[in-house]
Amino acid sequence: MMALLGSSRRNGNTEYLVNEVLEGVDHKEVYLLDHHMNPIIDERHTEQGFGYINDDYEELFFEFMKHDTIIFATPSYWFGMSAQMKIFFDRWSQYMRDDRIDFKEEMRKKQAYVIVIGNKPDPKIAALPLIQQFHYIFDYVGMEFKDYIIGQANKPQEILNDSHALTKAAFWNNQFKQSSHR
Amino acid sequence: MMALLGSSRRNGNTEYLVNEVLEGVDHKEVYLLDHHMNPIIDERHTEQGFGYINDDYEELFFEFMKHDTIIFATPSYWFGMSAQMKIFFDRWSQYMRDDRIDFKEEMRKKQAYVIVIGNKPDPKIAALPLIQQFHYIFDYVGMEFKDYIIGQANKPQEILNDSHALTKAAFWNNQFKQSSHR
Amino acid sequence: MMALLGSSRRNGNTEYLVNEVLEGVDHKEVYLLDHHMNPIIDERHTEQGFGYINDDYEELFFEFMKHDTIIFATPSYWFGMSAQMKIFFDRWSQYMRDDRIDFKEEMRKKQAYVIVIGNKPDPKIAALPLIQQFHYIFDYVGMEFKDYIIGQANKPQEILNDSHALTKAAFWNNQFKQSSHR
Amino acid sequence: MMALLGSSRRNGNTEYLVNEVLEGVDHKEVYLLDHHMNPIIDERHTEQGFGYINDDYEELFFEFMKHDTIIFATPSYWFGMSAQMKIFFDRWSQYMRDDRIDFKEEMRKKQAYVIVIGNKPDPKIAALPLIQQFHYIFDYVGMEFKDYIIGQANKPQEILNDSHALTKAAFWNNQFKQSSHR
């Protein structure tokens, strides 16, 4: 179990909900904020192809590859995932072509959960294109898109008012606890 | 007239289409690739608020503010805009709160055009969440979303096979030439 | 409180969920199935305009106009609302132009809840265009789109396996009971 | 080649665009308006299953089954296809279970084109959920979704102002003429 947090600040509502979901569940938490990752430079059509990039991405990517269940948690920034999280996906394009791994084979073993926190306009509607984007991403690589939570909050702690999001987080938490005990 | 290119390589199909659209039209072209921009660090809820970030963004942003017509051109990376372009939008959150400018007032004067180039699955469908995201962004700040082109291409020059995209690019070009002569 | 059911059969999962939501809540339930409604004939651009249509719609429409909270409940048929329910909306176009009522003024007082039941592919994703359509409809007439439930079920009673949908239904039920006691 | 028109009036913009697309192309045109079709009654889970319905649908359906290229043309009514056209799709659910035909096998041979005419808000954005719905429908049955045109018009003849739609219609017309001459 791995949680990837795309927030650009600590102690936010996204983090709060991730903690609810994973309370008592053994997991690896990664704050993308803490890792230096450059946007991708597309070398697909160059002679030399992709080369080694000197930043924190590769280590993060191989950590990610170890886990079967991934929680992608991001605030809705401008109706999309944070740029930090987008870098994480964009860089996949290099590893799809990396002989050291069987990218698609590994991806097909994974299950994805998504947490998106938005504010206004109502993210129950305005975050739907982002949910659809996640669907396309997971479908493309063969990951199973298990479920998503769209929470509504702005200031720190406001997520406590979104009882639907909290209920669903508790539900996931319960499922994760049960499956880890098997 | 300004063209913002989100591609992560030169000489691609996105660039080709932008050149078709702007051939003979006076404009400023900005390759986000050439500019060092950090992802946003959210300081909205801190005491000190946002501070100065030492990268190329602010100069770029003030250049952007000078133009009334903006062409946002991005390849579809993982069914979204490139992280480079996403950084450009995410950083707006700082300038919405910047006393030196009237962000929303300025934005309302602008017109947005979007060019997205995707490959598979068919971007006429798979890029629609991205188009919807652009719509939400522009609607939120009051920019008019004039039109979009979704092109299909992968390898360099493949856009030459997408006659719909080329026709629409020629149509825009014609409109831009006419309006600049007025 | 009014529940409009778009199902084309009795005792289905959509009905089950509506009953959960409205258990103990005073409401008017309308099964569109029981009412003969013709598809609209567009007379907007004819000289005579819309005229009286001899079917059950007008009575239904004026009943609908009496209620402030409406639950639109439909199975997902071919990734949209049922044709029965679509007729209900299409016929609005006549009443927008009806001097006997102030259509938009009345609509602005209403709150909409949506229940959609789908099966495969996963309606949490595949029903999102339908949710977006409801959003556009309500936004256009100024109704507030309060919330939606997307349930997954096929055969009768299968909704009992969708604990998220049931939980949310219970939550709505609780809210409706409380507000009716005020 | 078959054109299915979902409009609820003659001589509208949808019809105009269909005529542009099919000018000089051998085809069968069906106005759903002219055919009496009842909304589906779901008998999937009853003992007797679906039975014969005494209306014009079956004849229409078997005509539809004869053609390999289908143009689905509908005005955007309340951000969706017309109820008339929705009935056409909803009734498929019966024929998927009809032993006289191999529904999915036949569908996989077909190519679909979609024409949607909307007005306000801008259908380039507001019709996207409907385009996504068509995508889900065609994908579900294995039809190829070749292309779509979203036109903007309200009053009769207004489509003449939408040069993008007209250009694309002319482009399709050219393709259809060429392929029918092979």
Image (cartoon, coloured by chain):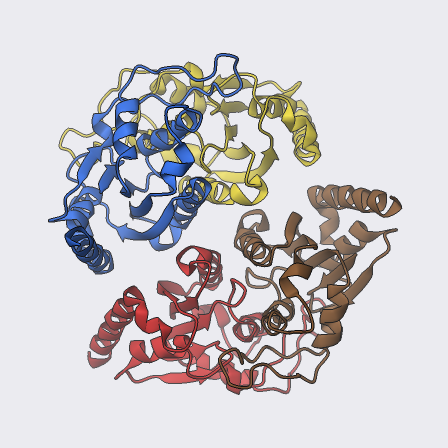
Chain colours: A blue, B yellow, C red, D brown
**Quadrant position of residue C97:** bottom right
- x, y percentage for residue A130? 39, 45
**In the rendered image of this protein, does residue D33 appear above or below residue A125?**
below
- x, y percentage for residue A113? 30, 48
**Quadrant position of residue B12:** top right
Taking the image as shown, residue A179 lies to the left or right of residue D155, namely: left
Report whether residue A122 is seen.
no
**Residue drawn at 60 percent across, 30 percent down:** B153
**In the rendered image of this protein, does residue A93 appear above or below residue A139?**
above
**Quadrant position of residue D87:** bottom right
- x, y percentage for residue B130? 47, 40
Instruction: Name the image quarter holding the N terminus of chain C.
Output: bottom left
Report whether residue A180 is seen.
yes
For the residue pair B104 and B150, the one nearer the viewer reads as B150
- x, y percentage for residue C29? 40, 84
**Residue drawn at 16 percent across, 50 percent down:** A20
